[in-house]
Amino acid sequence: MPLLASRRVVFGLAAAVAVSSFALPALAQDPAKLVEETAAQVIDIVKTKTGAARQAAVLQVLQTKFDLPYMGRSALGTHWNQATEEQRTRFLAAVATAEARAYSERFGQYAGQTLTVGKVANRANGVTVVDSRLNQSTGQPIKLEWEVRDGKITDVKVEGVSMVMTRRSDFNSYIQNNGGKVDALIAEMEKRAATQ
Amino acid sequence: MIDGVTKAIAASIRRSMVAVALAGTVLGGCATGDTGAAEVWDPIETPNRFIFSINRAVDIIALRPLAVMYRDLLPERAQTGVRNVLDNLGEPVTAINEVFQGDPSRAATTMARFFVNSTIGLVGIFDVATALGLERTKEDFGKTIGMRAGVEPENGGFYLMLPAIGPSNARDGTGLMMDYLVDPFRILTFNLAVDWDWYQLGRYGMNAIDYRSRTIFALDDLEKNSVDYYAALRSAYTQNRAELIRQKREKTDTKGELERRDSLALAR
């Protein structure tokens, strides 16, 4: 009798798994894998490329592994709704360039960092949070949290500081102090992308 | 007894935090959209920005160059030694906070660290305690308030830019003052009526340089990659403090949960 019951349980589980895998055909890649892959790619870029080549490679990683339009929209907050289609496109392009530049400069030279992926937690709103630690050759490891949505990374938190949230605060304050217009922000970001 | 006092303090703080939060919603009610936690309550933004510009001028002229020299010229081991001495002087304050956080056993560990490092570790130059398995923690009263107050850890009251010290808020500013008041080393030098001004000055000065030397990379990065440095720093500071408080809360939650399970197991 217990054997039968357990067999039924096994069948039930198997059926459930089968149904769920059919029901979610677009079930994207495992979030932990995605984070590991992204980190490996970035470390490889930092090791082998410098300057403009590095920036281009980082931009490519951002475009393939990150949901840049989603991140840009969150970062703009309420101003996104007021922006025209043309402003949105220009804004997203400027953000992508700014992020690519920031990341390619941030890493400097490779100094033996490695990424260890830890706990993976699913949130109710479809977001998966992947905990990880960036181990450095000297000093304390840095705590990195990745938010993954539909197989793409939507935010990175460094020691609790979210990239998107900080950008949002930064952008909103700039817009507010410049006549409440998104144009001012876009112009400033495009200017920065052109110089330096 | 201590727990009772802490609870009373926590309750009154909670009440005032709620009042602050309520005032915040009333005042900021019309300005908020779906901005959520990204917006830090900053009712005195103009004076804050003014202090910030002075802080930055001092930083550019004096503090940052000193910190860069300290980082690049002093041997790594000397820097570790300096940091250890400063950390060791801060241990009693951490222990006091751990008592207020309701974790006396952790406070005992911190004091054990302090005694081991002050003696065997030669006034704290060498962190022998860590090698002995006594891990280092760093607590402050801002975290203690944040842990006890029943509000979101992102809500630390109004944002406050302190002269020389930098970003803070009502919660952490109060915490800073409390930490200063209970610091045994400060009380000691004050009560002995010895002229230890130079000692105090050296301690706080070295603390500033050491801390700045460790934040050069992060702050340079934030400044370079933001269009409004003040707002970016305000957000990053608030998020980072909230994260530390959240970790504290989660830790006590798990501990409470384990204790609950233990007592259940005993009852069974």
Image (tube, helix red, strand yellow):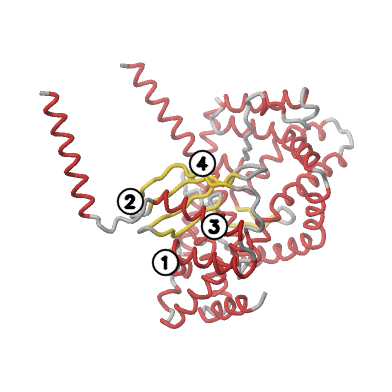
For mark 2, what is the residue?
A124
Q: Are marks 3 and 1 on the same chain?
A: yes
Kindly identify the residue that appears in the image at 43 percent across and 30 percent down: B256
Kindly identify the residue that appears in the image at 50 percent across and 56 percent down: A156
For mark 3, what is the residue?
A42
For badge 3, the amino acid type reads Val
Q: Earlier in the sequence, mark 3 or mark 2?
A: 3
| Residue B110's disc number | none
**Alpha-carbon distance for marks 4 and 2?**
21 Å
Q: Nearer the viewer, mark 1 or mark 2?
A: 1
Q: Secondary structure at mark 1?
A: helix
Estimate the x, y position of residue B34 in percent, counting from the top left: 41, 65
Q: Nearer the viewer, mark 3 or mark 4?
A: 3
Estimate the x, y position of residue A70 in percent, counting from the top left: 41, 66
Left or right of residue A69, residue A163 in this image: right
**Alpha-carbon distance for marks 3 and 1?**
21 Å
Q: Earlier in the sequence, mark 3 or mark 1?
A: 3
Mark 3 closeness class: few <14, some 14–19, many ≥20 residues within 10 Å: many
Left or right of residue B26, residue A1 in this image: left
Q: Nearer the viewer, mark 4 or mark 2?
A: 2
Q: Nearer the viewer, mark 3 or mark 2?
A: 3
For mark 4, what is the residue?
B247
For mark 1, what is the residue?
A70
For badge 2, the amino acid type reads Ala
Left or right of residue A84, residue A135 in this image: right
**Alpha-carbon distance for marks 3 and 2?**
30 Å
- Identify which residue, A43 or B174, lies in the foreground: A43
Task: Please identify the quarter of the rendering in which residue B100 is found.
Answer: top right
